[in-house]
Amino acid sequence: MKAQRLYKSVAVELLKLIDSGKYNIGDRLPAERDLALEYNVSRPTMREAVIALEIAGRVEVRKGSGVYIIEPKNTDTKSLDLDVGPFELTEARMLIEGEAAGLAATMITDEELEDLATIIARMKAENDAEDGSEIADKDFHMLIARATRNSVVETIIEEVWNLRNKSELTQTMYETVRTGGIRPSIDEHWAIFDALKARDPIAARTAMRTHLSRVIDTMFEATEIEAHEEVKRRVSEDRRRYKQLLQTG
């Protein structure tokens, strides 16, 4: 039986408290840090739960102020099932794509490197466009997956990208990031390219993990709810979890 997403479990519990009258329309929920401690989950999981409630029309997130209860728009708790969350997914990408980049560094051809350079140029053009397309970003990562010469690795990475694209929760998070004017980092993709060109597995793995760690940081920053300085102080502990991944392998 498929396990329930952790963020959904938390969102359902919060919804029960809202419906029970513990929190009334217009009330502000406790601080994210306090809720995370109360439910014994990470702050990324709590943030995903809050975004799920926002998508379901039960709360309103006010930047720099907090999360407020609003008039119900949808009481169907099934609407909280929004597939995989963005932090969980990106952490998985760090693990899987980091190792894939290390393997690809030993297998990639000169022709594939030329294709990667072309894709980075396309990525820059997409960043400059207004439609927010990130097709080149996926093409870049999938070419590296193919360069591993391992069809299982390629299939897994493609499925992770499919999960990213079909998850409403993850897409909402990425839309917030794009709305803030943040686009895929060209410099970070060139760093991955340089490591692959040097046929250096350790450097390629590190460059990929550094890039995806930066994606996690960006999502934290783009979805901050509390006052900026307070958030910077509070999220450092959670970020260390992801930074540790850079030191493994």
Image (cartoon, rainbow, N blue to C red):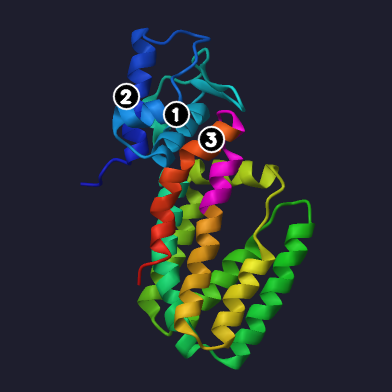
Residue 60 placement, left or right of 159: right
Residue at the limit of the structure toward the bottom, as seen here: 110
Q: On screen, 149 above or below 173?
A: below
Span of residues in magenta = 216-228
Q: Amino acid at mark 3?
A: Val
Q: Residue at x 36, y 35 (%)?
A: 8
Secondary structure under the numbered disc 2 in the rendered image: helix
In the picture of the structure, the residue carrying the numbered disc 1 is 32
Q: Residue at x 52, y 77 (%)?
A: 144
* Badge 3 vs badge 1, beta-carbon distance below 8 Å: no
Q: Quadrant of residue 157?
A: bottom left
Q: Residue at x 47, y 21 (%)?
A: 74
Residue 195 placement, left or right of 115: left
Is residue 29 inside the magenta stretch?
no
Q: Earlier in the sequence, mark 1 or mark 2?
A: 2
Is residue 226 inside the magenta stretch?
yes
Instruction: Mark 3 vs mark 1: give the one in front.
Output: 3
In the picture of the structure, the residue carrying the numbered disc 2 is 13
Q: Earlier in the sequence, mark 2 or mark 3?
A: 2
| Quarter the C terminus occupies | bottom left
